Amino acid sequence: MSEDLEAAAELFKALSSASRLRLLTILAEAPATVSKLAEASGLSQPLVSQHLRTLRAGGLVSVHREGREARYELADLHVAHIVADAVKHALELR
């Protein structure tokens, strides 16, 4: 059980940034490149890339190369549900 809790704690660490949650919300709509994510989120491309590295390391997003471009997408629908549930819960606490 301790290993399971450690894995869950690592997941929550990856989700602990509002910017990363914003990126996941955008990706829940459709896969996107770093430049499209930067445009949609208002974050700089280097910052988006940094957050995507964290999200990839946490298994929350995957990347598919298309020529010179990399297209990011949610690893699975559970990710979108986790983010939506967390946002809903946070709004209920207000």
Image (tube, grey):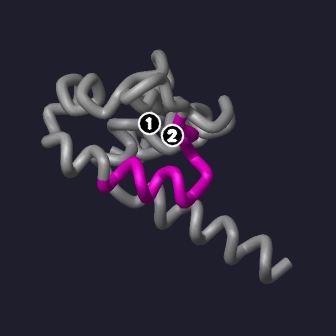
Q: In the image shown, does 64 or 12 lie closer to the viewer?
A: 64
Q: Residue at x 60, y 71 (%)?
A: 9
For label 1, the SS is helix
Residue 16 shows in this picture? yes
Q: In the image shown, does 48 or 25 lie closer to the viewer?
A: 48
Q: Residue at x 54, y 31 (%)?
A: 64
Q: Quadrant of the C terminus?
A: top left
Q: Residue at x 40, y 23 (%)?
A: 32
- Count neighbours of disc 1 (C-alpha within 10 A) and say few if under 14, some if 14 to 19, many if 20 or more: many
Q: Please report the bounds of the magenta region as a residue range.
A: 50-63
Q: Three-letter amino acid code at disc 1?
A: Leu
- Disc 2, disc 1: CB below 8 Å? yes
Residue 26 shows in this picture? no
Per the image, the residue denoted by label 2 is 83
Residue 47 image position (x, y, % from top left): 21, 50
Per the image, the residue denoted by label 1 is 24
* Res. 60 mark: none
Residue 16 image position (x, y, % from top left): 40, 60
Q: Residue at x 23, y 24 (%)?
A: 40
Q: Residue furthest right?
A: 1
